[in-house]
Image (cartoon, rainbow, N blue to C red):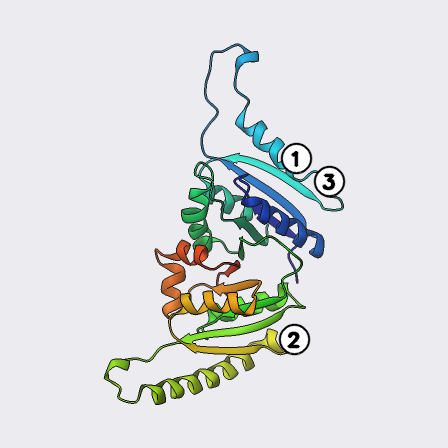
């Protein structure tokens, strides 16, 4: 089932226009309500100036900018929120309070508004949000079509695959796995070792897909991709060569990708990949 309530977290910079466009497109495609949230980190200054000389109220300015950006959007149920506080805390509160099922945000470069959103806030959201977080970097040119789900064959990556198949029922989905060789430096025949590891990855992939109910329900082929090497470099090359629209990553993983996604370099991976990234936290039962 596709989300019925989408939360767009925006810092109102020009780079977040892409996230806005994608959120509007998804809300229209899924017939979902769009909640647009901007968080003010500083309170309005106290002043004794006459009313006609006082600076505009930041809350009113932010609200008007959001409404101006949404001007002309027809047929979508849109709610605009301007709140004050720490961004990640406010976003997580709105998710829970309003029952939002997907968070959409951008990677703004604005030094005043965007630095925190690119790093700490996105990392906090991917760690704590109970719903998928879509980080938008590309200008939308249609629905997501070519999608890569990175996997280590864990339950976290299974949730990522199931989410991708549910949200994007017409997309071409590939399953990507990067592997390495333990103690490779002590192995004489490295090519044979890599070939053996590739076959093990193939067998794990087949078992993983067979044990994922959403694959049978989707009724479409999932193309497997296995490569030896460092996951970040391989993903970056893959999305550029294959023209990938979206990379889907699960959290709480057990392998090297877990260290990349959940460690201190999480924001660097999000910045490194030149496409949109959907981060899915493992569902708990």
Residue 217 is marked as: 2
Residue at 61% from the left image edge and 46% from the top image edge: 20
The 10 Å Cα crowd at callout 1, few under 14, some 14 to 19, many 20 or more, is: few
Q: Mark 3 sits on what residue?
A: 72
Q: Is residue 77 visible?
A: yes
Residue at 46% from the left image edge and 51% from the top image edge: 125
What's the distance in space between the residues labelled 1 and 2, CA to CA?
42 Å
* Quadrant in which the N terminus is drawn: bottom right
Comparing 122 with 71, the one in front is 71
Q: Is residue 159 visible?
A: no
What's the distance in space between the residues labelled 3 and 1, CA to CA?
9 Å
Query: Mark 2, mark 3: which one is toward the viewer?
Result: 3
**Are the two marked residues, 2 and 3, in contact with CB atoms closer than 8 angstroms?**
no
Q: Secondary structure at mark 2?
A: helix
Q: Mark 1 sits on what residue?
A: 68
Comparing 47 with 65, the one in front is 65
Relative to residue 31, is residue 186 depicted above or below? below
Q: Residue furthest front?
A: 241
The 10 Å Cα crowd at callout 3, few under 14, some 14 to 19, many 20 or more, is: few
Is residue 275 shown left or right of residue 259?
right
Q: Residue furthest right?
A: 75
Residue 125 is marked as: none
Q: Secondary structure at mark 3?
A: loop
Where residue 21 sits in the image (x, y, percent)?
63, 48
**Are the two marked residues, 3 and 1, in contact with CB atoms closer than 8 angstroms?**
no
Residue at 49% from the left image edge and 48% from the top image edge: 107
What's the distance in space between the residues labelled 2 and 3, CA to CA?
38 Å
Comparing 140 with 259, the one in front is 140
């Amino acid at each position: 089932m596709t989300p019925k309530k989408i939360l767009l977290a925006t810092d109102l910079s020009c780079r977040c226009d892409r996230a806005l466009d994608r959120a509007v497109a998804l809300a229209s495609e899924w017939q979902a309500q769009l909640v647009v949230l901007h968080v003010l980190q500083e309170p309005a200054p106290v002043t004794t100036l006459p009313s006609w000389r006082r600076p505009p109220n930041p809350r009113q300015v932010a609200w008007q900018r959001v409404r101006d950006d949404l001007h002309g959007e027809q047929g979508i149920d849109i709610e605009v929120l301007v709140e004050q506080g720490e961004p990640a805390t406010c976003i997580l509160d709105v998710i829970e309070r309003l029952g939002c099922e997907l968070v959409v945000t951008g990677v703004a470069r604005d030094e005043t508004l965007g630095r925190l959103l690119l790093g700490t806030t996105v990392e906090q959201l991917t760690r704590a949000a109970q719903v998928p977080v879509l980080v938008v970097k590309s200008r939308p040119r249609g629905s997501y079509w070519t999608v890569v789900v990175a996997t280590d064959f864990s339950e976290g990556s299974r949730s990522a695959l199931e989410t991708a198949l549910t949200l994007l029922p017409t997309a071409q989905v590939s399953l990507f796995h990067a592997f390495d060789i333990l103690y490779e430096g002590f192995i004489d025949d490295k090519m044979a070792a890599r070939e053996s590891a590739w076959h093990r990855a193939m067998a794990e992939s087949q078992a993983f897909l067979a044990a994922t109910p959403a694959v049978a329900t989707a009724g479409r082929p999932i193309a497997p991709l296995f490569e030896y090497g460092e996951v970040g470099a391989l993903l970056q090359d893959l999305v550029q060569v294959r023209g990938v629209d979206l990379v889907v990553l699960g959290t709480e993983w057990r392998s090297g990708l877990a260290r990349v996604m959940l460690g201190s370099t999480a924001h660097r991976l999000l910045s490194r990949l030149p496409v949109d990234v959907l981060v899915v936290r493992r569902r708990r039962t």
